[in-house]
Amino acid sequence: MTSPWLHYEAYGISVTNNIIHDTEGAGLGVNGGYNILMAYNTLYRVGSRSHAVEFVHGGRGCDGDTATCAAHQSAGGWGGTGAEGQFIPSKHIYFFNNIVYNPIGFQSRWSHFSVHGPLTPPSGSNVANPARADEDLRIAGNIIYNGPADLDLGLEDGCDAANPTCNATQIRADNAINTILPQLVNPAGGDYSPVAGGNVATRASVAIPSFSWSDAPSVPAVPGGSTNNAVGRNRSGAVRSGWGWPGAY
């Protein structure tokens, strides 16, 4: 860890316009991040071991360097001087306008997502209790085609009914989950672009809210980063019209 970034695992990261394919683990995920955008990516044949996308706690450990860990802790950093644990929360994680396409015969084994529920961090770790992986988690505008119609969302204890930005009803309403078989040119052959006039190229994406840095950790204070979440060009460099359509192209 490097001061002043002693809290979350990552800050202000945008993951956009990527092709991610043939993964045993999750195709994308956040483990303890702040202001993380994942948008306009195309995931193909992902998550065979368990789930396609994950939003879980980050890990923090000392790895024997107790002096440095103690100094970071005294400065307001999150963690301790003992064994590693997975308790670093996340805040403002946006998963927008992606395609998750597991073709017939391939699926994530247990669920679409893995979203961890709240947990109690270790005493003295400086992490607020409860530590949540789903605070202002937003999942919208995605096309997800993966497994049978009744495949579990995978929310576990996260994104419960009281969560205003992420809950089962909202996720099903704001995303196309197993209702659209994405019409891509030839994904099995490596061409992930949408068929002209097909159900991807004619589907409107949703607007992505801007980030704010007003609630970033203040002890030690973290400098603000970009707030703009527009992704103006696609993977090929073409300008998107408005918010475009889902996926990398």
Image (cartoon, rainbow, N blue to C red):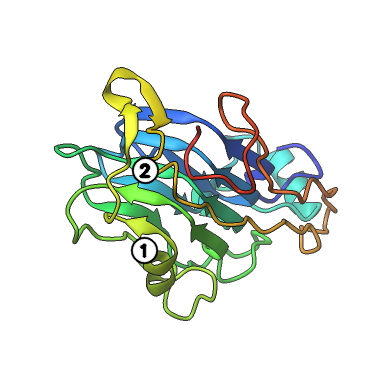
Residue at 55 percent of width and 56 percent of height: 206
**Which residue corresponds to mark 2?**
100
Is residue 83 among what the camera can see?
no
**Which residue corresponds to mark 1?**
155
Residue at 20 percent of width and 48 percent of height: 147
| Above-or-below relation of 105 to 172 | above
Residue 101, x across and y down, in percent? 32, 40
Label 2 sits on what residue type?
A: Val
Question: How many badges with numbers are in the image?
Answer: 2
Q: Do the residues labelled 1 and 2 touch (CB within 8 Å)?
A: no
Seen as rendered, the residue at the extreme top is: 189
Residue 182, x across and y down, in percent? 32, 42
Residue at 19 percent of width and 61 percent of height: 150
Closer to the camera in the image, 145 or 30: 145
Q: Going from the N terminus, do you reach mark 1 or mark 2 first?
A: 2
| Above-or-below relation of 137 to 142 | below
Residue at 57 percent of width and 58 percent of height: 89
Residue 16, x across and y down, in percent? 58, 36
Closer to the camera in the image, 27 or 209: 209
